[in-house]
Image (cartoon, helix red, strand yellow):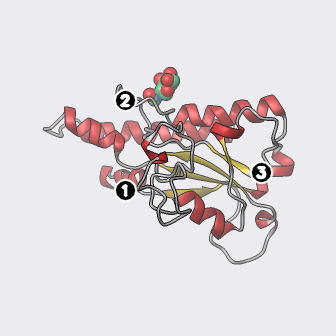
Amino acid sequence: MHYLMKLFFSLSLFFVGINGAVGSNQPSQANKNPKLFVFGNSYADTGNMKPTALSWKLPYGITFPGKPSGRYSDGLTATDFLAKQLGAKLPYLWRTHGKKKVKLNRGMNFAFGGSEVFDSPVDRSPNISTQVGFLVNLALARRVYTIDGDLASSYALLSYSGTDYYGFIDQNPNMAAYPAFVEFIVEDIQYSLGIMNG
Ligand SMILES: *[C@@H]1O[C@H](CO)[C@@H](O)[C@H](O)[C@H]1NC(C)=O
């Protein structure tokens, strides 16, 4: 694949229907009690950062819900929009529900503002593979998620955007190594999602 295509692929906000076509209006088994699992960064975080983070301070949240809500937005995030589109309840937040004995019947949001595919020294938000690991551990530990019962109605939103690239360009202004770095990013995303499938 041409690296620009890969760049587009990895820069775009995209979602993967684990099973079934997202966006189809055909009622199907896959659309019954849909559960949304969210991985990524501030475009998708609905409140996973600690209450001391900027996302809990004005002017965030002034349009919705009228005060800061942990979203890096004046209003809704990609997670809110996609949940609405799917007819799904807003997924539980990892920060508040990850340690509670809830079932995963509403899905869960593992996205953190500032998350990257690769670690950055200035940014301690869990990276993509750590977030996928949260789900794997949760599902295994609680045995509340089954392939037979839940997979067909599950959707995943994966939201990664520019932060990995900004950091790289800062340190490598001549861009010669950029195409290879883009490949690393795409491969890591594929690897992390592979863990999720297996
Ligand atoms: C993701 O974070 C974990 C935990 O900090 C770290 O061990 C791992 O190397 C990171 N992965 C990448 C690709 O940077």
Which residue is the extreme one toward the left?
174
Q: Which residue corresponds to mark 1?
A: 8
Kindly report which numbered mark, 2 or 3, lies closer to the viewer in this rendering.
2
On the image, which quarter does residue 96 sit in? Answer: top right
Q: Residue at x 35, y 25 (%)?
A: 121
Neighbour class for label 1 at 10 Å: few (<14), some, many (≥20)? Answer: few
On the image, which quarter does residue 196 sit in? Answer: top right
- Report whether 157 appears left or right of 29: left
Kind of residue at badge 3: Leu
Disc 2 from disc 3: Cα separation? 33 Å
Q: Earlier in the sequence, mark 2 or mark 1?
A: 1
Q: Earlier in the sequence, mark 1 or mark 3?
A: 1
Total number of numbered discs in the rendering? 3
Which residue is the extreme one toward the bottom?
25
Q: Which mark is residue 162?
A: none
Kind of residue at badge 2: Ser
Mark 3 residue element: helix
Q: Which residue corresponds to mark 2?
A: 120
Mark 2 residue element: loop
- From the viewer's side, name the closer residue of 174 and 96: 96
Q: Which residue corresponds to mark 3?
A: 151
Kind of residue at badge 1: Phe
Image position, residue 164 (x, y; %)? 35, 39
Image position, residue 191 (x, y; %)? 54, 36
Neighbour class for label 3 at 10 Å: few (<14), some, many (≥20)? Answer: some
Q: Residue at x 52, y 37 (%)?
A: 128
Image position, residue 86 (x, y; %)? 68, 67
